[in-house]
Image (tube, rainbow, N blue to C red):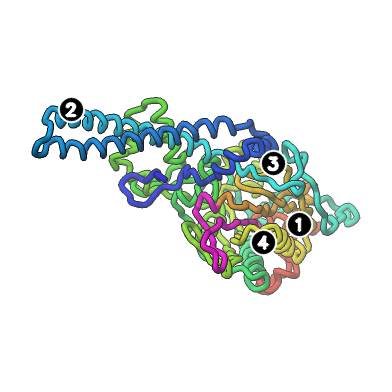
Amino acid sequence: MQLVRWPGRSRPCFFGRPSVLDLKWIRENPADFDQGLARRGAEPLSSTVLALDEELRAHKKALQDLQARRNAASKEIGKAKGKGGDPAKAEALMAEVAELKGAIAAGEAKERELDAGLTALLAGIPNMLLPAPEVPDGRDESENVELRRVGSPRDFAAEGFAPKQHFELGEALGLMDFEAAAKISGARFTVLKGQLARLERALGQFMLDVQTSEHGYTEVNPPLLVRSEAMFGTAQFPKFVDDQFSVYPGLAGGELLRVAQISYAEKLAEAQKSGDEATLKRLALDGEQEWLASAFCLIPTAEVPLTNLVRESILAEADLPLRFTALTPCFRAEAGAAGRDTRGMIRQHQFYKVEMVSITTPEASPAEHARMTACAEEILKRLGLPYRVVVLCAGDTGFGSRKTHDIEVWLPGQGAYREISSVSNCGDFQARRMQARFRAKDAKDVQFVHTLNGSGLAVGRALIAVIENYQEADGSIRVPDALLPYMGGITRIGV
């Protein structure tokens, strides 16, 4: 299989690898493929995919025939030039080889164009193999199905006061400063001070301790800057490029850019389709675009580096499951959130999160998904926060997920449940993009692993939930019992 490579580098770029989806399965099950897309609210694509696939395969066969004829003609030239040979025939054969050489060069360029078109199409198709009946049909979040509610919301009316939102409480205490953050960084940033800053740190440490010491996750301190290949591997690229922050270290002054970057394969396909010679030159088939190869992305979640720990690997089944966790800052552009949650800390460009990632076998992934959901729920139970668990309908399930549980915590200031964790079973969707496989004992063949990820939990939103659920009439905030060992004797904030 021909891989698209970063200019000037020997490492392959995995953008748009044909293995991101199982083409053989699509050929054999076009109706099921389209049905899976239909459940997600997408148009049928089997005829488009298979037409491009057939065109590419037919072109490769024709190109192989040309190459075989060139090789045969080259051998015939030697004989025709030899003793007792035919000089006229040699001359004709040489002309034929020259013509074949040009045809092959044109054919190889056409193959790259066809391959780029097919692989870019495949890279933009979501994980359409949804299990039934576990994932309900539906178009959007209004048709998600609630599985359970745990805990009862506090009756503030019985206590004689109305609950405030977290930003009202935080600002009144002088410990949450949005104006200072805006002067430094702009909108959707927050400065936490004093006891609230400590409370946020306590939440992250508490979550990490529970996931590592009780739930069997291995703590990892991963890079916060990752290559575009890693973003593609976990399906942030190319679908969610507008939600990412990118860094190009080679630019003058170390300039930090917000770049709407798409995959190399897509750029190449667009340039070839439009005949944009300047872009083709820059994409450099001749190695002049080293700056693209040197680009980094700030992680939107530790799912990216944790899952990519197994990229391009063949694991032993006996070593599975692998379970990783990390407490990291996360960075998101929130490109699609204009006008939403503009007050407070609900939707930020920078926030902390404890992430859980599991790598397991296909047979074990459903049980692992339930286990991970329980691991996330346990944090909320110990914090005494009311919550509910919903299973996302097909139309609301994320691009790379096969099945997702959302955990939503009760926020009395809003009078609503808001997402605090999303736990997803991605099946082999990410593994195909990363080439992450395993081999069973005594087996010759390898299989793709299944990958799962979930928040355990989003620290910023947990802070919001604690502030709002543990507020008192005087504007102070009680510290949950589970966090007392982390707070250095502080039992109440704001007194």
The amino acid type found where label 1 is placed reads: Gly
Most extreme residue toward the left, as rendered? Answer: 83
At label 3, the amino acid type is Asp
Give the residue at mark 3.
396
Q: Is residue 136 visible?
A: yes
Measured in 3D between alpha carbons, the distance from the residue under mark 2 to the one under mark 4, in whole angstroms, is 64 Å
Q: Which residue position is annotated with label 4? A: 364
Residue drawn at (18%, 31%), measured in percent from left and top?
A: 94
Q: Which residue is mark 1?
A: 475
Which residue position is annotated with label 2? 92
Q: Examine the structure image and report whether residue 469 is included in the region drawn in magenta.
A: no
Up the image or down, 370 lies above or below 129; here it is below
On screen, 232 above or below 451?
Answer: above
Q: CA distance from mark 1 to mark 3?
A: 38 Å
Quote the CA–CA distance across marks 2 and 3.
Answer: 64 Å
Residue 176 drawn at (x, y percent):
63, 54
SS at circle 2: helix
